Image: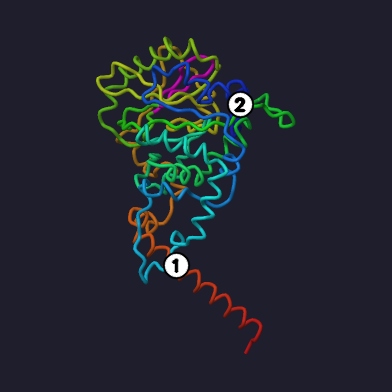
Amino acid sequence: MEDGQFAEIKITVDDILSCSYSNWYSKFKDYTFSEAAIYKPLSKEFIEYLESDGIELPKDTKKDSVLFQDVSPNSDNEYSDWENDDNEKETDESIKKFEDFHLTLREKIKEFGSVAPKLNWSAPQDSVWIMTGRNMRCYSTTDLFLLLKSSDYLNHDMYHAFDEACDFDKSNPPKFELELVLRKWVEINPSMEFRCFVRDRQLIAISQRDLNYYNFLDELKDELTEKIGIFFDDILLSKNEANSFVFDVYVPKPFNKVYLIDINPFQRSTDPLLFSWNELATMSVSEDDIKFRLVTEHNSGRFATKAHSQNHVPKDFLDASVDTQSMVDFLKKCKELELNGDSESESESESKENPK
């Protein structure tokens, strides 16, 4: 490969389809860490709701959401959008188009207690900034719909899932059913989650999943490599037909069991974490020499920026999101700035039309 060129990564439509959640979950359900409910095919009305501009939420579940609290009217919040009865009626109408599905989702969230959502391949990790816990934990359909509607990552599954496939034909796109997955929320230790890369049916690399420095991981590297390697050889390889893929695992103490978290396509749109895709496409690795990469004390500064930071918002908004009154104050400030900006624009226009 010449300098400056990207290494070719060959992935097929079938490889990508095999990584769709519903395609692998039934095979490996006994090895996953949390229960999941899969809904497919999704109705045209619900897909249109996901595609539509704006964010309309079910008002009847806001009381169960961690994001909404009752606000008593006062002079500081007299124009709050969520106090408008007309807006609430509009919200109800948008949800009524898939009312039965909404009720099904609400009951499933109630059964699970809380959930983390995703579509076939992608999870809305880019919109966790809007959640008070800065994670994907949803306690209600209000939380769920807000998280889904705020995400750009889900557009990948809806419109670009096969863009990197070598046999993808735009004139004859593959048929697949969009699905919504609700995974029961389970607390895990992020330091023990790892992303594993498989190329040509061989496990070639393992990366720490959470990019923070944990001083105890280095001494566990050999043991973790062995446990993950056995899990790959004995469980994954025999039941997963994809030639190349990426899988995430969780290995909690006492390290006697490996849990499968997710399976992703071996393609550039999947985050390579501590590797680069050129490395993964070209590295030569023997079966007994899997590359295991960790954040170390010496390189931790390189990963100081949090994941998905490009989707973050001003600190004032983050502070306000954990308190309703603060949110009201923040929106009022934004409104005042908007009005002042309009006034200044009008003044500038008048000055140009009536120069002295």
Residue 98 pos. (x, y %): 55, 40
Number of marks in the rendered image: 2
Q: Nearer the viewer, residue 31 or 7?
A: 31
The magenta stretch is 195-207
Dot 2 falls on a residue whose secondary structure is: loop
Please state which of the two labelled residues, at mark 1 or mark 2, is closer to the viewer.
Answer: 1
Residue 230: in magenta span: no
Q: Main secondary structure of the magenta part?
A: strand
- Judged left or right of residue 321, residue 154 is right
Can you say which quadrant of the picture contains the N terminus?
top right
Q: Nearer the viewer, residue 201 or 134?
A: 134
Look at mark 1 in the image and give the residue it sits on: 79
Dot 1 falls on a residue whose secondary structure is: loop
How many angstroms separate mark 1 from mark 2 (CA)? 55 Å
Residue at the spot 40% in from the left edge and 49% down from the top edge? 62
Residue at the spot 57% in from the left edge and 40% down from the top edge? 46
Residue at the spot 56% in from the left edge and 43% down from the top edge? 50
Look at mark 2 in the image and give the residue it sits on: 8
Mark number for residue 1? Answer: none
Q: Residues within 10 Å of mark 2 (few under 14, many from 20)?
A: few
Q: Nearer the viewer, residue 170 or 114?
A: 114
Q: Residues within 10 Å of mark 1 (few under 14, many from 20)?
A: some
